């Protein structure tokens, strides 16, 4: 629904999550003179994204008459959190109901927050469902309901920061965990690894990243934002040029015949073309590596020969390799590789010079780890951990 349609429907549209251009349109629609718009957008930006306010009356440097007009036409509402679950390991999962958009039924998405001692990672969704049909993925069995708007993508971060008390004046919850290091932000990293294929909703993902990384507002470094793709090759250079984030590739197989079944998009863009796009990813360097995700499927892709082939394929690409134990879901035909097999695979990758953390599922008790939603890294070995840390320090 457009702003005008929403207004006639009696719902006051929320300004939270809009881009600067979106805010400018909103202001113009209520008659704010053109010459004032830039200044007013800057004011709103500060209050919405830096201060996190949810009441126009707190915008003390905005004239009272304009505040009244704003609240007559707009709101600062966040999407509804239908359920919040906190895992015993501190992971939080929110079920978020999006505002209805015209004819669509209200859609629900999950958003997961994974705290560690020195960082807090938010896993966001880019679509409701997915058009792709990766055979090991739970989201792949759901039809695509719709793309999220850039506003809805940004709202996931705002909801998370509300809930963990990460705007000025809010208090942090007493349950769960928060990262504790000096100067560490509660949400320090974002991964587009929730529902959906972000590169099939590129414009909205790019615009959302623009809002999330804006230094006057939410202010997340682009080096701490990672977009994960199953391999939409033509959009990879565009992501680098227009969004400038870190890139993660869901590789999962080292041969085209197997990848064709696991990630059917491979039939369109094969491994060679995918790796070529990776080699040319703008800004790639040893300090800005591509993450290759590899889900460990028992007896399918987990042999030592495949580990060696993986290392050979990635030669020359500044890379990190993330081994992900498969999270089973009802009805799946796959099983997770046995732990000793994962260790062996990881050893081969590690001995070839890659940090090879195995992602230990987080939030299993609240099903935040299952299928489509996954977690940050926990490292198998002290050495691997040290390598990662050294690398992160190098990245700043
Ligand atoms: N569509 C994008 C991003 C969302 S999926 C992509 O495919 O990259 C995020 C990650 O979770 C991907 O690496 C995906 O392959 C992985 N994944 C999906 N289902 C999984 C499962 N059941 N167990 C473990 N990882 C899974
Ligand atoms: Fe879609 Fe990613 Fe799941 Fe594949 S792995 S079905 S691209 S969400």
Image (cartoon, helix red, strand yellow):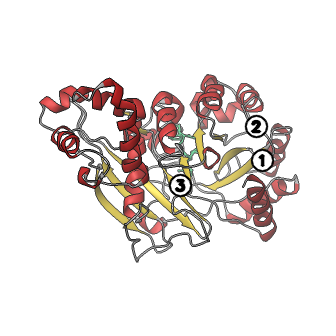
Q: Earlier in the sequence, mark 3 or mark 2?
A: 2
Foreground pick, 108 / 185: 185
Residue 168 position in % (x across, y down): 41, 63
> Given this view, does label 3 or label 2 mark the residue nearer the observer?
2
Q: Are marks 3 and 1 in contact (CB under 8 Å)?
A: no
Counting every numbered tag in the picture gives: 3
Q: Earlier in the sequence, mark 3 or mark 1?
A: 1
Task: Using residue 37 as the reference point, say whether residue 200 is left or right of it.
Answer: right
Indicate the secondary structure of the residue bearing disc 1. Answer: loop
Task: Using residue 385 as the reference point, say whether residue 219 is left or right of it.
Answer: left
Q: Quadrant of the N terminus?
A: top left
Which residue does the numbered mark 3 point to in the structure image?
374
Which residue does the numbered mark 1 point to in the structure image?
287
Q: Is residue 220 visible?
A: yes
Q: Is residue 250 above or below residue 396?
A: above
Q: Disc 3, ligand 1: is the CB inside 8 Å?
A: yes
Which residue does the numbered mark 2 point to in the structure image?
284
Work out which residue is located at the far bottom of the displayed protein and give it. Answer: 174
Task: Using residue 119 as the reference point, say whether residue 29 is left or right of it.
Answer: left
Indicate the secondary structure of the residue bearing disc 3. Answer: loop
At a point 37% along the width and 62% down the height, the residue shown is 163
Distance (Cα) linking label 3 and label 2: 25 Å
């Amino acid at each position: 629904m457009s702003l005008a349609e929403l207004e006639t429907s009696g719902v006051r549209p929320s300004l939270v999550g809009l881009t600067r251009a979106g805010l400018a349109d909103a202001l113009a629609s209520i008659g704010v003179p053109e010459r004032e718009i830039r200044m007013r957008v800057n004011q709103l930006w500060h209050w919405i994204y830096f201060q996190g306010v949810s009441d126009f009356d707190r915008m003390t440097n905005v004239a009272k008459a304009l505040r009244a007009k704003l609240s007559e036409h707009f709101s600062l509402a966040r999407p509804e959190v239908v359920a919040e679950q906190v895992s015993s390991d501190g992971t939080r999962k929110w079920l978020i109901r999006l505002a209805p958009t015209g004819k669509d039924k209200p859609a629900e998405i999950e958003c997961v927050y994974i705290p560690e001692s020195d960082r807090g990672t938010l896993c966001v969704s880019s679509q409701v469902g997915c058009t792709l049909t990766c055979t090991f993925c739970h989201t792949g069995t759901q039809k695509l309901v719709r793309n999220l708007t850039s506003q809805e993508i940004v709202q996931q971060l705002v909801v998370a920061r509300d809930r963990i008390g990460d705007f000025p004046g809010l208090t942090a919850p007493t349950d769960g965990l928060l990262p504790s290091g000096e100067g560490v932000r509660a949400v320090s990293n974002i991964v587009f690894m929730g529902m959906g294929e972000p590169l099939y909703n590129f414009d909205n993902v790019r615009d959302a990243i623009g809002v999330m990384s804006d230094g006057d507002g939410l202010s997340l470094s682009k080096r701490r934002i990672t977009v994960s793709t199953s391999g939409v090759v033509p959009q990879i250079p565009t992501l680098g040029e227009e969004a400038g984030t870190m890139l993660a590739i869901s590789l999962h197989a080292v041969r085209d015949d197997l990848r064709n079944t696991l990630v059917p998009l491979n039939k369109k863009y094969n491994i060679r073309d995918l790796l070529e796009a990776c080699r040319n990813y703008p800004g790639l360097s040893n300090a800005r590596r591509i993450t290759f995700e590899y889900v460990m499927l028992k007896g399918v892709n987990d042999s030592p020969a495949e580990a060696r082939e993986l290392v050979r394929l990635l030669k020359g690409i500044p890379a990190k390799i993330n081994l992900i134990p498969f999270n089973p879901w009802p009805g799946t035909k796959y099983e997770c590789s046995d732990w000793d097999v994962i260790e062996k695979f990881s050893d081969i990758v590690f001995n070839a010079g890659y940090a090879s953390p195995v992602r230990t599922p987080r939030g299993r008790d609240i099903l935040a780890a299952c299928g489509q939603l996954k977690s940050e890294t926990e490292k198998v070995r002290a050495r691997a951990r040290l390598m990662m840390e050294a690398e992160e320090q190098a990245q700043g």
